[in-house]
Image (cartoon, rainbow, N blue to C red):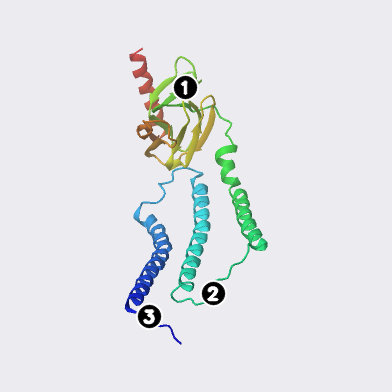
């Protein structure tokens, strides 16, 4: 004998169906909008900042590769979620519930695949890591950068060409470097952990108290760019900003001479 439903039961089922479809639509919308935003962002100018370094393309390529890899997993996960929500909606699915224990084979698969993927990424990024963090150029330091709450103290060699002597040139939050030349920075911290971040040069390195850390790069374009701290270093972290100026060797030498004269005038 068929089961008959009253008006209240029909209304309840109808509401459940509407709610279920809303959540199915919402979860389906997440990957669609997510992919759409990432496709739209480069054309809208809200993607990665302009790259003005010789190694930046490797960093950007690695970022894009990992983004596509994780994005594919994200989309597949969302699609499976939507399919299961649709297939096993309790208003349409009349199949009895089946309880099963864990599958050791399935657990092995979803453990091995992520581990193999991470191992592949670790090997894939070795050239980029070596260029930025291992293959240090055999040149004297261009300057020393000392981070402290909440400013960047910059120290250039004076006329003697040697750091940490009496004729050194000191500035605050005003980093100048010559274009198309290898730059070597000695990075230090006076107080807490900071992070020396040049977004347009794809450089980010922690400044650790008690350590002198080498940072190197080669800039390829003239212009003015941001220097910021990328590590929460205290209440004034938000204002720990500087300016990077990339200029010709002649303009760089003129700027150094101007700073040297200004410094001598107040000594």
Instruction: Examine the rendered structure and indicate whether residue 158 appears above or below residue 16.
Output: above
Residue at 48% over, 67% down = 79
CA gap, disc 1 and disc 2: 79 Å
Furthest toward the top, the residue is 267
Q: Position of residue 33 (x, y in %)?
A: 39, 61
Q: Secondary structure at mark 3?
A: loop
Label 3 crowd bin: few (<14), some (14–19), many (20+), radius 10 Å: few
Nearest the viewer among 225 and 79 is: 79
Can you say which quadrant of the picture contains the C terminus?
top left
What residue is pinned by disc 2?
A: 96
What residue is pinned by disc 3?
A: 5
Q: Earlier in the sequence, mark 3 or mark 2?
A: 3
Q: Residue 12's image quarter?
A: bottom left
Q: Position of residue 161 (x, y in %)?
A: 49, 21
3 lies left or right of 7: right
Nearest the viewer among 211 and 136 is: 211
Q: Earlier in the sequence, mark 1 or mark 2?
A: 2
Q: Earlier in the sequence, mark 3 or mark 1?
A: 3
Q: Position of residue 210 (x, y in %)?
A: 53, 24
What residue is pinned by disc 1?
A: 157
Q: Nearer the viewer, mark 3 or mark 1?
A: 3
Instruction: Examine the rendered structure and indicate whether residue 245 appears above or below residue 68.
Output: above
133 lies left or right of 202: right
CA gap, disc 3 and disc 1: 88 Å
Label 2 crowd bin: few (<14), some (14–19), many (20+), radius 10 Å: few
Residue at 49% over, 26% down = 188
Q: Nearer the viewer, mark 3 or mark 2?
A: 3
Q: Nearer the viewer, mark 1 or mark 2?
A: 2
């Amino acid at each position: 004998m068929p089961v008959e439903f009253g008006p209240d039961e029909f209304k309840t089922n109808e509401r459940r169906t509407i709610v279920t479809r809303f959540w199915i639509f919402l979860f389906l919308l997440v990957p669609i909008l997510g992919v759409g935003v990432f496709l739209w962002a480069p054309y809208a100018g809200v993607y990665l900042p302009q790259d003005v370094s010789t190694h930046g393309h490797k960093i950007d390529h690695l970022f894009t590769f990992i983004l596509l890899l994780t994005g594919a997993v994200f989309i597949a996960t969302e699609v499976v979620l939507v399919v299961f929500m649709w297939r096993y909606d309790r208003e349409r699915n009349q199949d009895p519930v089946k309880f099963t224990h864990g599958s050791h084979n399935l657990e092995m698969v979803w453990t091995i695949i992520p581990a193999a993927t991470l191992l592949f990424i670790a090997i894939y990024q070795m050239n980029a890591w070596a260029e930025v963090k291992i293959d240090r150029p055999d040149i004297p330091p261009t300057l020393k950068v000392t981070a402290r709450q909440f400013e960047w103290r910059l120290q250039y060699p004076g006329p003697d060409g040697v750091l940490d002597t009496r004729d050194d040139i000191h500035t605050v939050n005003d980093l100048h470097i010559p274009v198309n030349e290898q730059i070597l920075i000695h990075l230090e911290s006076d107080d807490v952990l900071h992070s020396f971040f040049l977004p347009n040069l794809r450089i980010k390195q922690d400044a650790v108290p008690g350590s002198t850390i080498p940072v190197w790069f080669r800039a390829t374009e003239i212009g003015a760019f941001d220097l910021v701290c990328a590590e929460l270093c205290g209440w004034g972290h938000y204002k720990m900003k500087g300016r990077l100026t990339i200029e010709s060797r002649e303009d760089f030498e003129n700027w150094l001479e101007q700073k040297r004269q200004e410094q001598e005038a107040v000594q």
